[in-house]
Amino acid sequence: MFTGIIKSLGSIREINEFDSKLELWIGVRSDIWNETNIGDSVSVNGVCLTVVKKDSKKKSLMSFIFDVIGETLDKTNLKSIKCFETVNIETPLKISDGLDGHIVQGHVDTVATIINNELIDDNWLLEVKIEKKWLKYCIKKGSIAIDGISLTIANINDHYNDKHGSFSVAIIPHTFENTNLKFKNKNDTVNIETDFFGKYIENFLKPRLETNE
């Protein structure tokens, strides 16, 4: 479980393709590398991955190695990741930690497309296009994770086109400078995890609503 508060940026060092998976080598800061063990979970652009190996042949190039399976590739933007690309890194929430951000599981719902990323009044306004079936879980002033970053929805547009809506979030300078959003441009993709409370409520109420119909 994560909070959407990015701890560090990482860099894609190596990508090895196999029949049913990708092997990603991601360079990380030394403190993150030292505190994380093989078998631990790490959020990479909002995707919960398991560290299968650690490499430190060069102290300046400490890396985690992850296996990314087909289902994860299908549902996230990791399928289009490239070497030297910058990714958001977050280690799991500890019991002793305070709960900043919001509860993020690292289970990406869908991939969205950036349609606007511009500076307005010292804040960056990010607008993304998302399939309408996921827009129903987006609530104005509610939380959402974009590439693993906990953000608050500022506005919602239900009618971007027939299949998609959009929502926008305001990015404060600190978040912009300390996440991969500063490298994102129009038409780039981002991983979206909607607030899981809404999905649990829908799952709980759906059988009751169907019974009453």
Image (cartoon, rainbow, N blue to C red):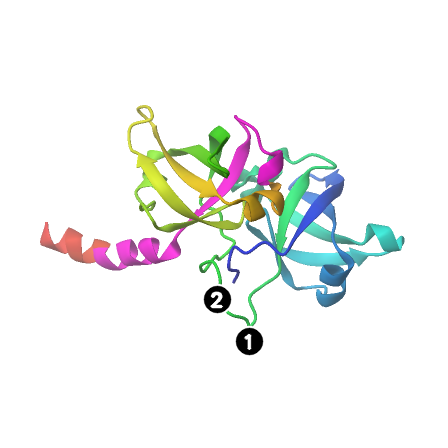
In the rendered image of this protein, does residue 20 appear above or below residue 210? above
Q: Amino acid at mark 2?
A: Leu
The residue indicated by pointer 1 is 96
Q: Could you tell me residue 103's position as x and y percent?
A: 45, 60
- Total count of labels: 2
Name, please, the residue furthest toward the bottom.
96
In the rendered image of this protein, does residue 126 appear above or below residue 51? above
> How packed is label 2: few (under 14 Cα within 10 Å), some, or many (20 or more)?
some
Q: What residue is drawn where x is 57% and y is 29%? A: 185
Q: What residue is drawn where x is 68% and y is 41%? A: 86
Give how far apart the Cα atoms at labels 1 and 2 are.
Answer: 9 Å
Q: Could you tell me residue 75's position as x and y percent?
A: 51, 41
Q: What residue is drawn where x is 53% and y is 33%? A: 189
Kind of element beneath mark 1: loop
Q: What residue is drawn where x is 70% and y is 64%? A: 36
The residue indicated by pointer 2 is 99
In the image, residue 204 lies in the stretch drawn in magenta: yes
Q: Amino acid at mark 1?
A: Ser
In the image, residue 58 lies in the stretch drawn in magenta: no
> How packed is label 1: few (under 14 Cα within 10 Å), some, or many (20 or more)?
few
Name the foreground residue: 202 vs 148: 148
Name the foreground residue: 191 vs 128: 128
Quarter where residue 17 is shown: top right
Residue numbers of the magenta segment: 181-205
Kind of element beneath mark 2: loop
Q: Could you tell me residue 204's position as x and y percent?
A: 26, 60
Name, please, the residue furthest toward the right.
58
